[in-house]
Structures are given as C-alpha cells and as structure tokens.
Amino acid sequence: QVQLVESGGGLVQAGGSLRLSCKASGSLPSRAVMAWYRQAPGKPREVVARSSERGTITHADAVRGRFTMSRDNALKSIYLQMNHLKPEDTAVYYCTVGASWAAPDYWGQGTQVTVSV
C-alpha cells in the first residue's frame, strides 16, 4: 500500500508563491509516474504536472512558465514550486502515483491553495 502526504498549501495574494511537497511511503509501482492534480470548486480534476520515473516532467499549458515540478526518487517525493499565482489557481491540489498519470492508483488527501486578488 502506498500513502501520499501533501503539505505546503495555504492562502497567498495574487502574484505570490507557494511550494507544495508530497512524500510517498510504501512500495511504489515499478516505473511509477507521479503527478500533481488540482480541482477547483465546480470543476473537474485536471492534471497540473507529471513526472516519469526517469524524471521527464511535463507541465499543463495553464501553468507552464509559472509552476515547476521536481522529483526526488531517493526521498520518494515530488514538489511543485508555484510562482506568479493567479486567483484561478485556487483549488485543492493532489499528489498522485501510479503506472499511468491519466489513471493514478493512489491519491493524497489534498492540500488547499487559495489565491486572493
């Protein structure tokens, strides 16, 4: 069983920055893909960024150039540095892991990010 624990969310003004962290425990799937998803009120979940086991990282168009995902396999952790935050980035952010980023096997409990105008 894999457990994921996110941290680092909070309230920030537009233009500010936050850094999310996610630490996994347990045995990760082979070739585990780790990703950050978010869900805003009244909207479906969307992938924000994803990382292959080898560290190939892809960011969604909506956050490219503002957010940076990184991964540390030794620590079983991923991070999301969020700069130039906008009110539309307000959402619950989830860490995921699985064999496929599109259908994760495990989800964290989520961390709230709120960006005020």
Image (cartoon, helix red, strand yellow):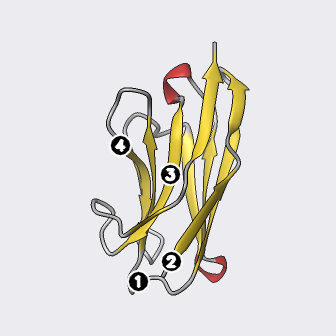
* Corner quadrant of residue 103: bottom left
User: Which one is in front, 88 or 107?
Assistant: 107
Q: CA distance from mark 1 to mark 4?
A: 22 Å
Q: Is residue 16 visible?
A: no
Answer with mark 1 or mark 3, whichever residue precedes in sequence: 1
N-term mark: 2 or 4: 2
Mark 2 lies on residue: 2
Give the percent coordinates (x, y) of residue 110: 55, 50
Image height of 24 relative to 74, above or below = above
- Whether the residues at callouts 1 and 3 have beta carbons within 8 Å, the answer is no
Q: Is residue 95 left or right of residue 113?
A: left
Q: Which residue is mark 1?
A: 29
Q: Which mark is residue 46?
A: 4
* Disc 2 versus disc 4: nearer the observer: 2
Q: Which residue is mark 3?
A: 94
Q: Nearer the viewer, residue 107 or 48?
A: 107
Identify the amino acid type marked 2: Val
Ranked by sequence position, the earlier of labels 3 and 4 is: 4
**Residue drawn at the location 36% of the way across and 42% of the way down:** 45
| Above/below status of 68 relative to 87 | below
Depth order, front residue of 23/31: 23
Mark 1 closeness class: few <14, some 14–19, many ≥20 residues within 10 Å? some
Q: Residue at x 71, y 48 (%)?
A: 8
What amino acid is at disc 4? Glu
Residue neighbourhood size for the residue with mark 4, other residues' Cα within 10 Å, grouped as few (<14), some (14–19), many (≥20): some
